[in-house]
Amino acid sequence: MKKTLLTLLLIISFSSCKSSKHTKERTTSSTKIITKKNIKKNSKTVSSGTSSNKSKADYIIDYAKQFEGIRYKWGGTTKSGMDCSGLVFESFKSYHILLPRISRDMAKKGTKIQLKKALKGDLLFFKTGNRRNSINHVGLIVDIIDNDINFIHATTGKGVIISGLNETYWLKAFHEARRIL
């Protein structure tokens, strides 16, 4: 009897375990979960094993862009809600680069760089709002056009968006740039 009960208990406990790493696939045609195995590019899937002139930074940026328009959620790391450090954390993690989960801790990783030497895939750190004495916001550089640095990040008001560093608010709050790749 004890043996049967123990076996039944083990079967129930193992059958209820699910990995939190698995993502449910959405059924809408405009949204696709991008994994390290495939990247959506102009409605075609490019395998990461094929030769391509895309850099690791390009793939990380593409991964981050799939969250554009997702609402802000403090501590969020999924399509149901995302915060700024969660966006960066998940984007780098998708390519096996583990960063700390909090923006002020991310700012201790990589190499500090001059803003004029920043490239796609570098991180921008900010001191915003009432907490201007410590880093509390991070963004991922997606492109640089005519000396305007565009970065993807999650804001409390608009969710995941792409902004320009030349915007007055972000330029005033900017603290430093760091290179991880």
Image (spheres, rainbow, N blue to C red):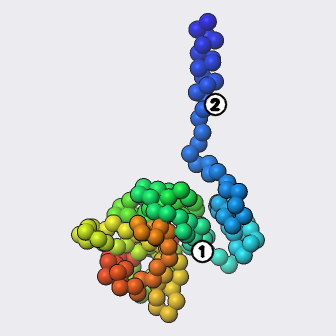
Q: Secondary structure at mark 2?
A: helix
Above or below, 152 against 93 in this view is below
Callout 1 amino acid: Asp
Q: In this rendering, does residue 26 appear at all? A: yes
Q: Which mark is residue 58?
A: 1
Above or below, 12 against 44 in this view is above
Callout 2 amino acid: Ser
Residue 154: horizontal and vertical position, in percent? 45, 68
Q: Is residue 95 left or right of residue 39?
A: left
Q: Are marks 2 and 1 in contact (CB under 8 Å)?
A: no
Disc 1 crowd rating (10 Å Cα; few below 14, some 14-19, many 20+) is some
Q: Which residue is mark 2?
A: 15
Q: In this rendering, does residue 50 appear at all? A: no
Residue 120: horizontal and vertical position, in percent? 52, 79
The quarter of the rendered structure image containing the N terminus is: top right
Q: Is residue 161 left or right of residue 130?
A: right
| Alpha carbons under labels 2 and 1: distance apart | 39 Å
Q: Residue at x 59, y 35 (%)?
A: 17
Residue 34: horizontal and vertical position, in percent? 65, 62
Within the image, what quadrant is residue 27 found in? bottom right
